[in-house]
Image (cartoon, rainbow, N blue to C red):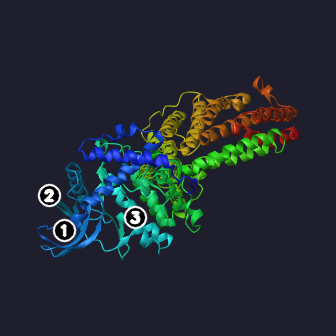
Amino acid sequence: MTTDSGSGQQDPQREQRIEEALIQFLDLRERGEEVDLDRFLAGFAEELRSEIQARIGSSIETLAILAGAAEDDEVPTISGFRIEHVIGSGALGTVYRAQDEALDRAVAIKVLRRGTAQSRRDRILAEGRRVAALADRAIVTIHSLVEEGDCSAIVMELIEGHSIDRVAAALNGSQKAKLLTEVARALRVAHSQGIIHRDLKPQNVLVTPELDVRVLDFGLAISSDEEEERHKGLFEGTPLYASPEQVAGETLTPASDLFSFGSLMYQILTGEAPFNAATVNDIFNGITSLEPTFPRRIDGAIDTDLQAICLACLAKDPADRPSAREVHEDLRRYLGGDSIRLRPALYSDILKRNITRHGEDLQEWSQQGLISADEKDRLDLVYRRIIEEEDHWIADARSLTLKQIMLYAGAWIGVMATVLFAFYPFKQDPGELVRWLAPTSICLLLIGAGEFARRKGDRMASAVFLSSAVLALVPAMISLLRSFSWLAVVPPDVEQLFTGLTVDDVTNQQLLLATLVSMALSLFALGQLRMTAFAWTTTLLVAASYFSLLLVSDYLGWQNDGWKSVAFLPLALLLPFGLKLEQQGRVRWALPFHLLVLLVAVLSLDALAHVGGPLELIEPVDDRHLTFFAYAINGVLFIAMMWICERSKSLDLRRGARILEWIAPFHILGG
């Protein structure tokens, strides 16, 4: 982390004002007055408040330690336990090694200081009871609570080990990741029960000689509900590992623990805290205002995936941080050799900031003729893909594992299986029940697999399974309608698509209903799940539904080939929809709609040219010269379309212009 070189030097007058404020606050407390910290700080200049707040917090902690120092010399007496010696001491109390005389086992006993406020003492003991219910291998076990007179203590499992930062210094990246996975696991379990740790730091994570992890000292832990009622404004915790909202004295959430976890992970990976500085004020300034140095700049051997997980946790905005469950699952993916899912908000911020600046340079270079418009578009396309979040769609994934590829192949095999059950002429008929039940079951299995993957946080797998289910629904519905003879009545004089085939009992109406239902479901899934896979399935099903509608309108029986050729041109009305999506930043969603419009326009005009050109719309034409001339006219039309697209603000349309530029000459020469 970089800081201003002069940030560590204090103005003497500023320092004096801070000291006077601290003395004033402590005097008020000494006289027994209730002090509202927010009101107290409001009486001082805004630029001094954060430092005054930090000094007050540190002073209160120091006074608590000093007040209990004399008690440390006096070994407490607790019934049923033989106190052996002091293990450690902190602001809340002293930890002793002791022997449980009844069970003949070594334990650790944390004795709260006698000066601890009763409300805080009650809260700590209450949380001790809640933490005791967190039965997890990564959380220290609390055996019992003791209250004898003015002595309150927590009896817990004795951990023979060292702090995680000390142990991790001698480990490799994979071993460090295993330790961090256990810490994330502990937070996941605690957060699932509504408990926030609030003081996660290396000293509160012990590692045994067997490399087992124990998260301990939930002395500052508090439930999510109680946090809402807690008095705001007074900093509690350890400065180096505090979250921005903790520094500001705001209401804490589980996301605060994730920031502390990110700081802890940074320490484990690099050997130093992310926001270390000479003074508490500078530490707080770094936590709230500065971005951490990338871990790989400190140690190039750190894996990029571990760096990504760490920086994702260190997002300034709590909403940008992952949950403990997501971190735990991503660390497990890393250890299993799979691709991680987390992408730090910091990455996007840096890329957007620099790409925006470079984009302005590209615009200037293009205007001055240093690069062509086409070169600018190609660079814009690369930049747009970089700054977009990695999509939950196999075609756009930056990396895939063999396991993922096999899983996705299985999904598409499921789709093909539904098609076979619906249309394939088996030598031995499996029966009507199997004909509709098998594809329906496959659809339900794909939906179940997709929902399971979504709940497990694997959105890419979820997208593949759910989009496969949407496509499989078409043959599954056709099988169902066919088996029960629903919509089986064929209107007179309307040619059926499947006439003459082995499935000639499938009607156009059945196909239309199946595609419409699947299209509606795909569009709903696109809006709710916001996965690009459904943009592609929706586009495909829109085209299929429109074709089915034409079939119901006796498209196959139309006599005029010219009108048959241009019957699909109304699909070009999807262009404004695609442009709207692109304007909203949904460029991945817009792409399939733009491609469909381009494909429909080119194929419709070429089909019209093949049957004789526009004159065929009036009467049949049997003149090959007119056909060649129509192809040449299409070439000119494509050049005109290219000219319009090149001047569009839409990058997708400008990309389409390159396709038109490539095919136009062949049409002109062919004509």
Q: Is residue 608 left or right of residue 119?
A: right
User: Which residue is most to the top?
Assistant: 618
CA distance for labels 3 and 1: 29 Å
Q: Nearer the viewer, residue 656 or 625?
A: 656
* Residue 543 falls in image quadrant: top right
Pointer 1 or 2: first along the chain = 1
Secondary structure under tag 1 reads loop
* Residue 539 falls in image quadrant: top right
Residue corresponding to mark 1: 74
Q: Nearer the viewer, mark 3 or mark 1?
A: 1
Residue at point 34% right, 53% down?
59
Residue 195 % position (x, y): 30, 52
Q: Nearer the viewer, residue 200 or 178?
A: 200
Residue 542 % position (x, y): 58, 36
Q: Residues within 10 Å of mark 2 (few under 14, many from 20)?
A: few
Q: Is residue 127 left or right of residue 373?
A: left
72, above or below 84, in the image: above
The type of residue carrying mark 1 is: Glu
Residue 519 % position (x, y): 52, 37
CA distance for labels 1 and 2: 14 Å
The type of residue carrying mark 2 is: Asp
The type of residue carrying mark 3 is: Pro
Residue corresponding to mark 2: 150
Is residue 443 something that shows in the picture?
A: no
Q: Which mark is residue 202?
A: 3
